[in-house]
Amino acid sequence: MSKVALITGITGQDGAYLAEYLVKKGYTVHGIKRRSSMFNTDRIDHLYQDPHVENRNLILHYGDLTDSLNLTRIIGEVQPDEIYNLAAMSHVKVSFDTPEYTANADGLGVLRILEAVRLLNLIPKTRIYQASTSELYGLVQEVPQKETTPFYPRSPYAVAKLYGYWITVNYREAYKMHASNGILFNHESPLRGETFVTRKVTRAVSRIALGMQEKVYMGNLSSKRDWGHAKDYVRAMYAILQQDEPSDYVIATGITTTIRDFIRKAFNEIGVEIIFKGENVNEVAVLNYIDEKMFIEKVGEAYLERFKERIGEEVVGIDPQYFRPTEVDLLIGDATKARTRLGWEPKYTLDALIQDMMQNDIKLMKKESYLREGGYKILNYFE
């Protein structure tokens, strides 16, 4: 009999990569997705099977972390060996606009899952992974941050996740559950949502190179983050639940980079050099140099002449609306515990991550450009 895993947030970046990873390992994977008037399964469509197929290894259920009866019913029907709680309102800036919903989903949602497992008498059978976050460290009290570093959350999202973290620890200690937190630092990929800063950058750089967009507006360029590839991080999630004893683990690369340098590296990936000028809200980036051979190789010769005409023009600006009321300036993780106990090591460097994202978005933006030229409607995302 194959193991059974239940993934909340299966249609998200991490859920999609984890589902693929577990299916390849022979798991039967059940996923929970929220009801919407539109399909939101793009990231897992390649794994999806018709409901009429016998012995399917990917099965979807409608559900929501704010609905305890629904969660309890699904967990009772699925009888999972492993639960990966990846669902959340995960956009830090938006959490300031929707604090109550964020607390309900990201905080109480964790409690609902833990309590369902307890009430269904699944504690001996079911192991639980809670997706925690480096945003817990917020106003950092120690550099780098590790499992023992004090938390200082700086957003409604982080505060809600703090409750999720501690209620997981509490149920582990109170009821002897195999429940663990993965304190994951920023992890990105071509599947990252369009409004998250890294994907916003790689999409915008691709659109600018193709002549589809003039400029991208950003928030605090000096914020530093520890960025890894989501493919590496789902391997860590799996490894955490394979341990004999539950525990909490920091998952990180140990390298920090400013958003400014991430943007610079994204342009460098297509052979373009930019220069930042000015300070604070007046800071801009202008096109300075093009490696024509590299640009043709990465983007295409058809786009070169028009792009060359933009040398000296601004391609990055600042919009204060993207600043957070309370900012997290520096995150860098110490994953020594994960390396020693789990044997986990990241395979992707930051440059390899950016290359993967840029290649994907150039291809995607070219497709959108062709559709637009053909008179078809396409969606625009500029946030």
Image (cartoon, rainbow, N blue to C red):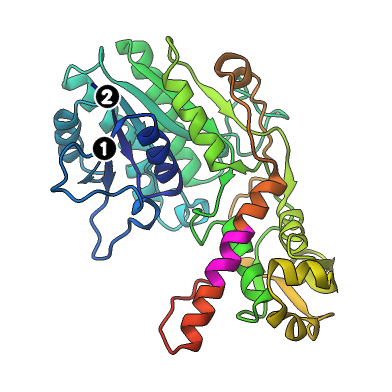
Front in this rendered view, residue 378 or 26: 26
Dot 1 falls on a residue whose secondary structure is: loop
**Residue at the (64%, 45%) spot, across then down:** 328
Part of the protein shown in magenta: 358-365
Q: Which residue, given by chain and number where applicable, does mark 1 sit on? A: 57
Front in this rendered view, residue 277 or 286: 286
Left or right, 344 with respect to 316, comes to: left
**Residue at the (66%, 53%) spot, across then down:** 354
In this rendering, the answer to whether 51 lies above or below 281 is above
In this rendering, the answer to whether 14 lies above or below 264 is above
Q: Does label 2 or label 1 sit earlier along the sequence?
A: 2
Left or right, 358 with respect to 178, comes to: right
The secondary structure making up most of the magenta span is helix
**Residue 149 location (% of width, % of height):** 63, 24
**Residue 266 location (% of width, % of height):** 71, 60
Q: Quadrant of residue 332?
A: top right
The quarter of the image holding the C terminus is bottom right
